Image: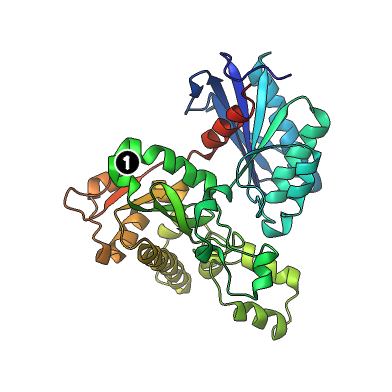
């Protein structure tokens, strides 16, 4: 029987596994809840490349070399060794996993056993960049440490409050009955915002709010009363905004054309849409906005492509904010989060300039400092910048799951 997590000194490990990186964090839990700041955290990056980098606890990075076919498995093994060192004999009460897709079945965190794992594997085709790697970590732990409680926390769950009209696809109705619908993603990120915005900004946070999660993956979430009522990602994490390497919303006819006329295989088309599109595909230079912004003044063909990529990136965000503002019936607050949202003052300014109809006015100094409140007192809407903290949300769910 598991020791209750409200015991002082309880520890929760959170794993956030993607195709090329694994984030991890160790949280202390007690009767008062889970500490919002992790006790120890880190990241393995570049999985599958020639060299893999491990960073944790503010110490210098370590370079790891793994065989490509074993890179993800070996990265998990390396993290496990480091976690054991960090525990220093203390007990790990649970491991929480960010699992991207819970399908139409899982709307809340769930304790993982073999049956749940088998269920989650059926959703791999819906999130091929993320689902297999989270499940690999779960499977390894189930086999090697069946005594440790594991909890799956789903990125789709937060959008369970979205009305049916927003979930449906305009396909034959039996597609809806088979589970083809707009699920929405980045739910743990949006759930975090739903927990902290009112504390920082007051009652306006319960109004008509759009949160912009802008990272290598990107989406928007429209919230009312701190619940999701609409989002830009849909059936898959390809939909909605233009991203680092993903295309975002795309005319299905373009996919048909690529396959029928240009004779691209299904596998090749999938690779193009997930890995060769977005900022990288249009610019031909990088998927990283800071890299592109540093080169946008180039007076050559590459510079033209970079400017086109950044303009399209901003336009897609503005267009979708406009659409969600219509769904909300107005806009009281806009919040930027995730890597780009938190750190790119230039892109925040460009987005807000293009949203003049909604009335945002930014304080230039506050925006340059990535302050929490970046709008002026006379701005018609509040504009904020909030860090993402998906790991803490997952740790809270795991702590609750093992309470006795």
In the drawing, does residue 250 fall left or right of residue 262?
left
In this figure, which residue is indicated by the disc labeled 1?
A: 372
On the image, which quarter does residue 96 sit in?
top right
Q: Residue at x 20, y 54 (%)?
A: 379
The image position of residue 311, as x and y in percent, is: 40, 68
x, y percentage for residue 78? 72, 31
The correct choice, above or below, for 196 with respect to 334 in the image is: above
Q: Nearer the viewer, residue 31 or 341?
A: 31
The residue closer to the viewer here, 54 or 254, is 254
Left-right relation of 346 to 110: left
Q: Residue at x 34, y 39 (%)?
A: 198
Of the 4 image quadrants, the one containing the N terminus is top right
Total labels: the figure holds 1
- Look at the numbered disc 1 and give the secondary structure of its residue: loop
Between 366 and 302, which is closer to the camera in this rendering? 366
Provide residue 297's location: percent of width, then percent of height. Answer: 37, 65
The C terminus appears in which quarter of the rendering?
A: top right
Q: Residue furthest bottom?
A: 261
Is residue 249 at all visible to an observer of this figure? yes
Q: Is residue 271 visible?
A: no
Residue at horizontal 83 percent and vertical 33 percent from the top: 143
User: Depth check: 374 or 220 in front?
Assistant: 220
**Vertical comparison of 236 with 207: above or below:** below
Q: Residues within 10 Å of mark 1 (few under 14, many from 20)?
A: some
x%, y% of residue 302? 48, 70
For the rendered model, the colour scheme is: rainbow
Direction from residue 141 to residue 38 in the image, left or right? left
User: Please, which residue is most extreme toward the right here?
Assistant: 143
**Against 2, is 199 above or below?**
below
Image point (61%, 21%), residue name: 11
Give the answer, above or below, for where 366 lies relative to 321.
Answer: above
């Amino acid at each position: 029987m598991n020791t209750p997590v409200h015991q002082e000194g309880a520890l929760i490990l959170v794993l956030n596994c993607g195709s090329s990186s694994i984030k991890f964090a160790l949280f202390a839990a007690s009767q008062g809840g889970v500490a919002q700041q992790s006790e120890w955290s880190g990241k393995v990056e570049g999985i599958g490349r020639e060299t893999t980098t491990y960073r944790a606890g503010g110490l210098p990075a370590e370079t790891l070399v793994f065989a490509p076919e074993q890179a993800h498995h070996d990265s998990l093994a390396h993290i496990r060794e480091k976690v054991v060192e960090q525990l220093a004999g203390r007990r790990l009460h649970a491991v929480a996993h960010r699992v991207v897709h819970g399908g139409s079945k899982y709307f809340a965190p769930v304790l993982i056993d073999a049956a749940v794992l088998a269920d989650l594997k059926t959703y791999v085709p819906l999130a091929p960049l993320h689902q297999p790697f989270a499940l690999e970590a779960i499977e390894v732990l189930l086999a090697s440490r069946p005594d440790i409680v594991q909890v799956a926390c789903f990125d789709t769950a937060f959008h369970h409050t979205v009305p049916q009209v927003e979930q449906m696809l305009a396909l034959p109705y039996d597609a809806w009955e088979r589970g083809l619908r707009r699920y929405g993603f980045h739910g743990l990120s949006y759930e975090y915002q739903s927990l902290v915005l009112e504390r920082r900004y007051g009652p306006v946070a319960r109004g008509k709010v759009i949160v912009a999660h802008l990272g290598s993956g990107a989406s928007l979430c429209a919230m009312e009363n701190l619940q999701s009522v609409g989002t830009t990602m849909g059936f898959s994490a390809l939909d909605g905004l233009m991203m680092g390497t993903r295309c975002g919303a795309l005319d299905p006819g373009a996919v048909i054309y690529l396959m029928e006329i240009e004779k691209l295989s299904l596998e090749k088309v999938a690779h193009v849409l997930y890995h060769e599109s977005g900022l990288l595909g249009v610019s031909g230079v990088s998927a990283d906005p800071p890299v592109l912004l540093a080169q946008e003044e180039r007076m050559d063909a590459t510079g033209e492509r970079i400017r086109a990529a950044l303009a399209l990136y901003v336009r897609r965000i503005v267009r979708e904010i406009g659409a969600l503002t219509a769904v909300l019936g107005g806009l009281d607050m806009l919040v930027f989060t995730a890597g780009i949202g938190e750190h790119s003052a230039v892109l925040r300014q460009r987005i807000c300039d293009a949203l003049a109809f909604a009335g945002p006015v930014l304080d230039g100094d506050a925006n340059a400092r990535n302050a929490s409140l970046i709008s002026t007192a006379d701005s018609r809407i509040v504009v904020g910048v909030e860090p993402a903290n998906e790991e803490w949300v997952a740790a809270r769910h795991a702590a609750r799951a093992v309470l006795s």
